[in-house]
Image (spheres, rainbow, N blue to C red):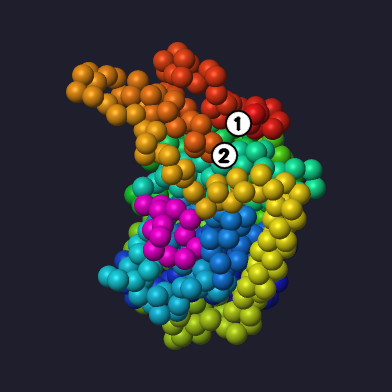
Amino acid sequence: MPASKLDQLCVNTIRTLSIDAVEKANSGHPGMPMGMADAAYVLWTKFLKHNPKNPNWFDRDRFILSAGHGSMLIYSLLHLTGYDVSLEEIKNFRQMGSITPGHPEYGMTPGVETTTGPLGQGFGTGVGMAMAEHFMSAKFNKEGHNIVDHYTYAIVSDGDLMEGISHESASMAGHMGLGKLIYLYDSNSISIEGSTDLAFTEDVPKRFESYNWHVVEIDGHNHDEITAAIEEAQSVTDKPSIIVCTTHIGYGSPNKQDSESSHGSPLGEEEIKLTKEAYGWDPDKKFFIPDEALEKFREELTKGEKAERAWNEKVTAYEKAFSEEGKAFKAWVNRDLSAELDATLPVFEEDAKGMASRAASGKVINAIKEIVPNLFGGSADLGEVLKPILMDTDLTCRITRQAEPFITE
């Protein structure tokens, strides 16, 4: 079913902001935001739990734009939903001193969860975020007191899936059964060089099925299919999910849709006018945001404040019922480290120069394991080396998949 008139207006607002910003900068990737605007809009307005007024609220859903070259997609969403990303910053896309760089940078732009310059980086980081959520929910949640309960979403691209890190981290996520990890794959079959067939011909759905992921294939421009796919992914609690969204890069551009020409360079003034006309837009208006669209997007402010307020009430009730766990939870969330840490770290003498780095790392882990309870990690086929260090601690539980819960004490 086609999107409603208002929904389509909102989606086209994302597209035109992205087009105009890239054109003004004379640099960037307009095609990906144009192609994934439908899926991103549905995710952000129907599913994403977030509070634009408090981007660092702990139990928010995490959203990662792993396809960071399409950064104007997330900048448009951040501005429209009410984050502290002004229209002036959108107009200053890719300019020195702006908070809207060519690729999203963590710590620079409110609402950006991680830096996603190198392809595949966001894919791998999302797996780590989902691991952290699963670990903390098993550690702290009690019956009737779910204080850690959020999803990790990402938009990933062909380029992400070509990188080796996506294979390794996808395998780990499937092995661990990270059910709150949901990726939307922008399957548009176009790379900056041309058709992805030039270098990428694997069967992506089968690949992820073999990794123990839940796989759904949809029309990435059909809002009903997008909604149903995300709902289905949320219902699968024992596997991560990838939603393969078949999309058109440069959607709506009469001469550049489905072409690499919309991938890594501006559309050009004449093509922008034609594209805006295809959207039913005034071709002479730049950075135009219809009032009805902005009103719809800004509903996220009220929804976000309500969700955070409800969570704060949950935490208050949790702290009353479980005082020690409540103190530990706050310490973990605030990233508090013991004052004893520095004194606990081993000192390596001159004769340690020949020590293998894995052995030195093991000594550090062994030294701090008791005072950094939220430390967890693994080894690259070096279990035998680390076994003497880890055998008597709960760290072994943190590097292997447990049925339920994820970690056992």
> For the view shown, which residue lies furthest in the right direction?
144
Q: Position of residue 363 (x, y in %)?
A: 38, 24
Q: Are marks 1 and 2 in contact (CB under 8 Å)?
A: yes
Check the image and report above or below for 211 versus 342. Answer: above
Residue drawn at x 69%, y 48% as measured from the top left = 323
Q: Tag 1, which secondary structure?
A: helix
Check the image and report above or below for 282 versus 6. Answer: below
Q: Amino acid at mark 2?
A: Met
Residue drawn at x 36%, y 47% as measured from the top left = 118
Residue drawn at x 45%, y 77% as measured from the top left = 86
Question: 46 or 385, which is in the foreground?
Answer: 385
Q: Does any portion of residue 46 appear in the rendered image?
A: no
Q: Position of residue 110 (x, y in %)?
A: 47, 66
Please name the residue that numbered disc 1 is placed on. 176
Q: Position of residue 288 (x, y in %)?
A: 49, 82
Drawn side of residue 358 relative to residue 258, left or right: left
Answer with the quarter of the image where residue 221 lies: bottom right
Check the image and report above or below for 196 versus 259. Answer: above
Q: Give the quarter of the figure containing the C terminus.
A: top right
Please name the residue that numbered disc 2 is placed on. 131
Residue drawn at x 71%, y 31% as measured from the top left = 404
Answer with the quarter of the image where residue 396 lies: top right
- Crowding at mark 1 (Cα within 10 Å: few <14, some 14-19, many 20+): many
Drawn side of residue 143 relative to residue 229, left or right: right
Q: Give the quarter of the figure containing the N terminus.
A: bottom right
Stretch in magenta: 104-117
Q: Nearer the observer, disc 1 or disc 2?
A: 2
Question: 316 or 386, which is in the foreground?
Answer: 316
